[in-house]
Amino acid sequence: MLKAVIFDFNGVIINDEEIHQELINGILLRENVRPDSSEFQELCLGRSDKACLSDILSRRGRMVSDDYLDNLIEAKTFAYREKIESLEELPIYPELKDFLTHLKQHNLRIGLVTGALLSEVKFILEKAEILNNFEVIVGGDEIARSKPEPDGYLLAVEKFNQLDNSLKLTPEDCLVIEDSPAGIEAAKRAKMPVVGIANTYPYHFMQRLSNWAIDYFSDLELERVEKALTS
């Protein structure tokens, strides 16, 4: 039965993929590497900054140490916060707050799994005044392997059960909301049903990859999902 809904962050909670691409491009230029938009889409969307930068630099013949990568990511995190602070309005997706209320009305637990740094995620959620909706948050700095590996989603299940040992949550009891192929694959590898939201890729593409596809949060019929999971 459906017990928990787990969100991705970038591209699902906040519309900031363009900001991330701009900042990654800036890092690459400072590293004398020419940015490539198709490469960003392939190697960065849905994945941690560390995995993204490591793979791009490696593909361009640049092998860098973990410490070097950590310094690049630290600079990007600082630049990201500055960029977010400069915005007049936080680009949280429409309908999100209403949807979170809807999930609570259905007595569903709410979590989040992302490749973004935990501090970055909490900073945004607190600024958007929605942090207290999420019982469990797994940041990219808490797992060794980025999406499409399932580690983050499996850790989320562990965290839910640690919070409430009577919950007895299994991956099959969770519904994931993702916007990228890497994220959808991670959820599927974790044995979790997944909804593809067409924020970053078109609806028909999400439809091919995920169990259900939606354009907006309001399109998700929880009763239909629950019926499918119990049939």
Image (cartoon, rainbow, N blue to C red):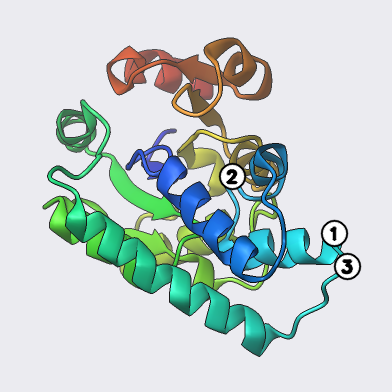
User: How many angstroms separate mark 2 from mark 3 (CA)?
Assistant: 21 Å
Q: Please report contact status of discs 2 and 1: CB closer than 8 Å, yes or no.
A: no
Sequence order check, earlier mark of 2 and 1: 2
At label 2, counting other C-alpha atoms closer than 10 Å, the crowd grade (few under 14, some 14-19, many 20 or more) is: many
Quadrant placement of the C terminus: top right
Provide the residue designation for mark 3: 61
Looking at this view, name the residue that lies furthest to the right: 61
Alpha carbons under labels 2 and 1: distance apart: 16 Å
Q: Are marks 2 and 3 in contact (CB under 8 Å)?
A: no
Q: Amino acid at mark 1?
A: Arg
In the picture provided, is 97 more to the left or to the right than 34? Answer: left
Q: Residue at x 70, y 44 (%)?
A: 36
Vertical order, 70 against 132 (above or below): below
Expressed as whole percent of the image width and height from the top left, the position of residue 88 reads 12, 45
* Residue at the image point whose x is 66% and y is 59% from the top: 52
Q: Specify the amino acid type for callout 3.
A: Gly
- Of residues 196 and 41, the one nearer the viewer is 41
Tell whether label 1 touches label 3 (CB within 8 Å).
Answer: yes
Tell me the residue that label 2 is attached to: 45
**Placement of 173 over or under 34, stated as above or below:** above
Dot 3, how many residues are within 10 Å of its Cα: few (below 14), some (14-19), or many (20+)? few
Q: Secondary structure at mark 1?
A: helix
Quadrant assignment, res 75:
bottom left
Quadrant for residue 199, please give it: top left
Question: Disc number at residue 59?
Answer: 1
Nearer the observer, 60 or 47: 60
Residue 72: image tag: none
The reply, left or right, for residue 97 in relation to residue 15 is left
